Structures are given as structure tokens and as C-alpha cells.
Image (tube, coloured by chain):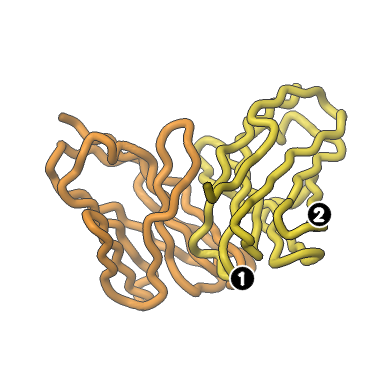
Amino acid sequence: GQSLEQPSEVTAVEGAIVQINCTYQTSGFYGLSWYQQHDGGAPTFLSYNALDGLEETGRFSSFLSRSDSYGYLLLQELQMKDSASYFCAVRGGGAGSARQLTFGSGTQLTVLP
Amino acid sequence: EAQVTQNPRYLITVTGKKLTVTCSQNMNHEYMSWYRQDPGLGLRQIYYSMNVEVTDKGDVPEGYKVSRKEKRNFPLILESPSPNQTSLYFCASSIGTSSYEQYFGPGTRLTVT
């Protein structure tokens, strides 16, 4: 079968750094995406890793290790507005097709003042 | 403004009454997709389309139909809705045929009684 595992909840304080991990076991793999979703809102794209290593976009970074089937999203200088759900998603997870995106069940991040 | 729109945003219906949820994008994207989101399960792909007249099943296609007669529109059809189709539905689109960076609509909350 296929599965994506990520923690259900993470709590951190404003200004801190938090890492959200994602491990995957899927029939195919072309890359790992990260999405953010605020309560009542639509998911929005944050980052994508097709190759091993770290991708940095402002306060957010994403890492991938294909040999370990593992990735993480790193959020630095946390702000209250970062409180949201974060989803990892594997491209190629559904039946191995590069055209499908299979999502994890999401991590609820709460940022405390 | 570049966007994906869905209608209706909220719908309460009864078992067996056919319904259509419309989705339209103004970004000239080739790829469009439908997801359902249920608590604790993340987003699950229902159907996707690579271009006009090209559609394929996602991970949970049972009970749904789609069509892609025009590039900008990708309606989701429930021929005979059942209570287990009560969910939050998102339409998404992306440029080209890659799926990793998708733009999501605002969502349609469907309740089937």
C-alpha cells in the first residue's frame, strides 16, 4: 500500500523554529510538495523538492532524502499567522502516476505568543 | 485576478438527488483536479484531467463523474449522492501537466442527508 506519515499536531512559540517531518511509502515517487491550509481556507502551495537536499524560500525551507523516503518542512522565526495545517504531498503517490498528488493527513501547527 | 472558482460554496441536499459542482479557472492551466477533504484523512484525489477530453481516476473516484469539455471548466457530478459523500470538496489546477504546484479553489462544503 501507500502511506504518508506526519505528526498530527505541533506546538511552538512565536520566534521559534519548528520542523514538520514527513515519511512516505508510495508506489511511485517524483517529488514532495508542501501545502499550508488555514482554518476554513484553501490549501496553498509552499514548496517542492524533486531532488535530495534543501530548498529555501524566505522563512520556510524544505528538505528531501529520497533514499530515506523522508522530508521535512522547516519554519523559522515563527509568527502567529503561521498557525495552520501543513500537508506533505507526494507526486506519483497514486498508482505511481506523475500526474497524481497524494496528500498526508496534515499537521496542525499552533504558534503561541 | 488569477483564480479558481467553485460553485456553490455550500450545498445541502438529499440522498439520490443529482448535483453538479462547477469549477472554473482563468489561468489557462492544462491540469485540473478534484479532491475531497475529510477530518483526519487529508485531501484525497477524486479525478484529474490533463487537458480537454482527457480525464483519469484518482484515489477515490467511486460515486463521482467529471467532464472536461472546455479547458477552463471541470465540473464534478454526483449522479446519486449518498451521506458518505458529505465532505469538503476542492477543485485545483496547475500549469502544464505536472501536478506538484496546484492552485486551489475556495472549496464547496456538501452535506447529503
| Chain designation of label 1 | B
Residue at the spot of label 1? B97
User: Please, what is the three-letter code of the amino acid marked with disc 1?
Assistant: Thr
Q: Position of residue A16 (x, y in %)?
A: 13, 45
Please give the name of the residue rendered at 71% of the width and 34% of the height, measured from the top-left corner. Answer: B84
Q: Position of residue B67 (x, y in %)?
A: 81, 54
User: Please, what is the three-letter code of the amino acid marked with disc 2?
Assistant: Ser
Residue at the spot of label 2? B67
- How far, Cα to Cα, is label 2 from label 1? 17 Å
Work out whether residue B36 or residue A70 is closer to the camera in this orientation and state it. B36
Residue A13 placement, left or right of B75 = left
Q: Is residue B48 above or below residue A86?
A: below
Among the chains pictured, the one given yellow colouring is B
Q: Position of residue A64 (x, y in %)?
A: 33, 70
- Residue B15 visible: yes
Where, by quadrant of the figure, is residue A15 drawn? top left
Of the two numbered discs 2 and 1 on the same chain, state the one appearing first in sequence. Answer: 2
Among the chains pictured, the one given orange colouring is A
Residue B35 placement, left or right of A68 = right
